[in-house]
């Protein structure tokens, strides 16, 4: 038993080298699985896969590693390795697990397989005839042409590749494409808005859907939790009187719709444009969480904005080349405050507060904050640059209810959830 | 383990394979092995794959195989512990209090009564744990539930015990066999994945699907069944909005049968396409290629 355990341990080490994350608990599972499932090649492969591969994306990597490590039994047709793949695997496996290094297991394995074959000729003979070597045609495809998928982002730790490059080359094979796509969507979540290319912006918009859902769930649940299970004693007792004082029926307080109006002000000047558009779209998607949502964009003036089928429509049209001036926007806002602000209004401002050295008018913002439920400022700028140059964030910061950094999708989500 | 390894292997893998066959679930070695391991290692089995590839079916077949009942928890946005685990039966507790008061019991005695198992409304998870014999617990579409719920599941899945504050810890008498399914609406946490065995069920290959069709639609001409399987497989490769599931394939072949079609020419394809495809753009896409799909080389 021991040599087998050792071999499996080395196989797992090789998987780890190839970029798979395998925990100790999982490797113990794998040993138990092999002990239970036996050493017939396909059976063992599936047993190891079920315990070690927790994401279909990694399956290609696993199959390749398995094929190399347990390269014993006759090289079956369709299982030939691609020269490129071989190169990648070898470099990442650091020469471990060469076929010649595993004689005990291979022998054991061959024997067991022979035995099992002898035992099951009647049953498995048919199955094997029907679909040679691989029960799942998909697998064949996977092995057939997937040099790309092996270039797992986790496998190479140095030199992060450009996302653009990757998107261009990803093609031939399902699992691999999906895998790389997921990996760099995750990367985009963390990328600063300021560093976006147009392509990345489009990909970020793809991410909005799940983000919107999470946002709806989080904000919506607060409402549900608050009203769930709260007994209305007065009505319960009153209902009990009809039954001679037996409180047989519980009355609950009715759920009230949440009376929050959202007023979003987003700066769409060049520097924070992407952040603004994503926020606008996100809020438009989650409008059901609030009683009323009004979105405005500004540069030096206010303009009502709406998202219609993914396009930003503003009214009145904004001069996109104007110089940002939030002070003037505040003046406009306080003129319209009877129309726009109530005590239930949550004002969310997104911007970098770069006013081109014009008056900040923080006094007006203080007044607005006093009149409504809360004023939350989301600043997409890098923390280290807050308050430098013409940034007036240090004047606005003390008068708003809360100030959050929101430089990438992650931070933006966190800030919005905290704000709403 | 009492048995020698080999006998255990043969008995049980064979048992699983035969059981699946008996339950009319046609599958491959990958699925068999994963199910077998889930049974033997007593670990939850996380099944992923496209909609309609037979993920939920695995749990049903398992319960059939083990001749036990299936407890199902359908996940959705906002599912919470009260709906998944347990809730106190307020009404019954109140009635009990009234009755006890009438008979003059002291509060200590009353409170002892009303927080007992009799007043607990068992939701699926608690039901699965307290069942006197081993059940199959299906947690369907776990990706639809919130992350918080997923975190809550972790305790349950590793220890098979739940703590109810008033009652103490409830430990599983018989560890249920847990099957989780996910459509990847969102990424599941690493922690959950680590605790589960993983199985990816893809759409079946042509050969496997032909066998499924032959089994479930026995009256269909064998040649037509093969053609249908091949057609569906190539339709799935077109990158449609919603590729046809196995259930839809079966409905479609039944429709072919009832329409009295003998072979799959362009007219036959057009005739019942609505059964197979549920989006207008998918339909036009396939219809425009009907001729090339129908006259594929045999």
Image (cartoon, rainbow, N blue to C red):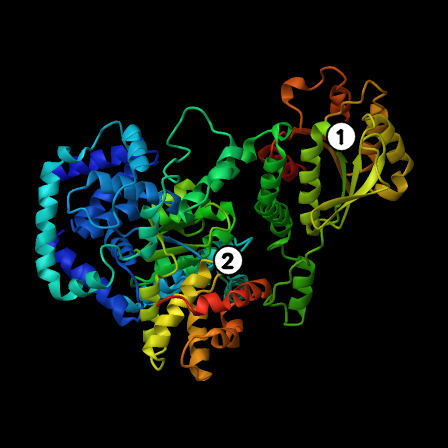
Which quadrant of the figure has residue B66?
A: bottom left
Residue B86 visible at all = no
- Farthest-out residue, top: A389
Q: Position of residue A256 (x, y in %)?
A: 71, 55
Q: Is residue A340 left or right of residue A264?
A: right
Compared to residue B203, the image places residue A276 above or below, namely above
Comparing B158 with A28, the one in front is A28
Comparing B217 with B104, the one in front is B217
Please tell me the numbered disc located at residue B83. Answer: 2
Which quadrant of the figure has residue B64?
A: bottom left
Q: Position of residue A220 (x, y in %)?
A: 63, 49
Instruction: Tell me the residue at 14%/32% (across/down).
Output: A101
Residue A102 visible at all = yes
Identify the secondary structure beneath mark 1. loop
Identify the secondary structure beneath mark 2. helix
Q: Is residue B161 left or right of residue A76?
A: right
**Label 1 chain ID:** A
Please tell me the numbered disc located at residue A351. Answer: none
Comparing B273 with B266, the one in front is B266
Instruction: Tell me the residue at 36%/74% (across/down).
Output: B225
Residue behind mark 1: A269
Instruction: Tell me the residue at 80%/32% (across/down).
Output: A320
């Amino acid at each position: 038993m021991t040599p087998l355990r050792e071999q499996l341990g080395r196989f797992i080490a090789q998987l780890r080298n190839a970029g798979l994350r395998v925990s100790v608990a999982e490797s113990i599972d794998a040993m138990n699985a092999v002990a239970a499932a036996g050493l017939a090649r396909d059976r063992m492969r599936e047993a190891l896969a079920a315990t070690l591969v927790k994401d279909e994306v990694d399956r290609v990597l696993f199959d390749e590693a398995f094929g190399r490590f347990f390269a014993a039994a006759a090289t079956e047709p369709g299982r030939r390795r691609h020269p490129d793949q071989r190169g990648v695997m070898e470099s990442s496996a650091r020469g471990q697990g060469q076929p010649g290094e595993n004689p005990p297991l291979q022998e054991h394995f061959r024997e067991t397989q022979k035995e099992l074959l002898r035992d099951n000729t009647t049953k498995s003979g048919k199955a094997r005839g029907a679909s040679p070597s691989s029960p799942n045609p998909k697998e064949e495809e996977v092995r057939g042409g997937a040099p790309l998928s092996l270039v797992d982002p986790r496998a190479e730790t140095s030199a992060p590749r450009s996302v653009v490059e990757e998107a261009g080359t990803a093609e031939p094979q399902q699992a691999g494409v999906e895998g790389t796509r997921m990996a760099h969507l995750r990367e985009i979540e963390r990328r600063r808005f300021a560093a976006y290319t147009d392509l990345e912006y489009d990909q970020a918009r793809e991410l909005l859907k799940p983000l919107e859902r999470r946002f709806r769930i989080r904000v919506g649940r607060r409402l549900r939790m608050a009203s769930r299970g709260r007994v209305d004693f007065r009505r319960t007792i009153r209902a009990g009187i009809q039954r001679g004082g037996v409180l047989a029926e519980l009355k609950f307080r009715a759920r009230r719709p949440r009376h929050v109006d959202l007023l979003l002000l987003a700066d769409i000047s060049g520097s924070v444009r992407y952040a603004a558009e994503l926020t606008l779209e996100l809020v438009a998607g989650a409008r059901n969480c609030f009683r009323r949502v009004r979105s405005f964009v500004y540069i030096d003036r206010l303009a009502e904005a709406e998202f219609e089928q993914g396009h930003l429509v503003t009214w009145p049209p904004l001069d996109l080349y104007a110089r940002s001036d939030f002070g003037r926007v505040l003046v406009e806002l306080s003129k319209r405050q009877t129309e726009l602000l109530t005590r239930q209004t949550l004002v969310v401002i997104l911007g970098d507060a770069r006013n081109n050295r014009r008056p900040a008018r923080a006094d007006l913002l203080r007044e607005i904050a006093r009149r409504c439920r809360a004023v939350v400022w989301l600043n997409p700028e890098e923390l280290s640059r807050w308050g430098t140059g013409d940034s007036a964030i240090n004047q606005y910061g003390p008068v708003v209810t809360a100030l959050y950094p929101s430089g990438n999708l992650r931070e933006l989500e966190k800030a919005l959830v905290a704000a709403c | 383990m009492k048995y020698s390894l080999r006998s255990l292997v043969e008995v049980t893998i064979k048992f699983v394979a035969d059981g699946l066959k008996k339950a009319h679930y046609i599958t491959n070695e990958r699925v068999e092995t994963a199910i077998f391991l889930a049974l033997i290692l007593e670990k939850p089995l996380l099944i992923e794959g496209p909609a309609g590839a037979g993920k939920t079916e695995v749990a049903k077949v398992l319960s059939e195989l083990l001749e036990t009942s299936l407890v199902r928890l359908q996940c959705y946005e906002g599912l919470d512990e009260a709906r998944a685990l347990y809730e106190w039966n307020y009404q019954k507790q109140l009635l009990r209090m009234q009755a006890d008061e009438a008979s003059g019991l002291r509060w200590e005695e009353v409170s002892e009564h009303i927080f007992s198992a009799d007043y607990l409304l068992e939701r699926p998870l608690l039901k699965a744990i307290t069942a006197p014999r081993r059940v199959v617990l299906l947690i369907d579409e776990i990706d639809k539930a919130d992350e918080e719920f997923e975190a809550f599941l972790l305790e349950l899945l590793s220890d098979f015990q739940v703590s109810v504050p008033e009652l103490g810890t409830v430990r599983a008498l018989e560890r249920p066999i847990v099957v989780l399914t996910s459509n990847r609406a969102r990424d599941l946490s690493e922690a959950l994945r680590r605790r589960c065995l993983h199985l990816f069920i893809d759409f079946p290959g042509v050969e496997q699907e032909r066998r499924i069709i032959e089994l479930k639609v026995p009256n269909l001409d064998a040649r037509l069944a093969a053609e249908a399987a091949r057609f569906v497989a190539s339709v799935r490769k077109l990158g449609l909005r919603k590729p046809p599931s196995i259930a839809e394939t079966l409905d479609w072949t039944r429709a072919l049968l009832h329409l009295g079609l003998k072979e799959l020419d362009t007219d036959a394809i057009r005739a019942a396409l609505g059964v197979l495809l549920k989006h207008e753009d998918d339909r036009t896409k396939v219809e425009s290629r009907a001729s090339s799909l129908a006259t594929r080389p045999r």
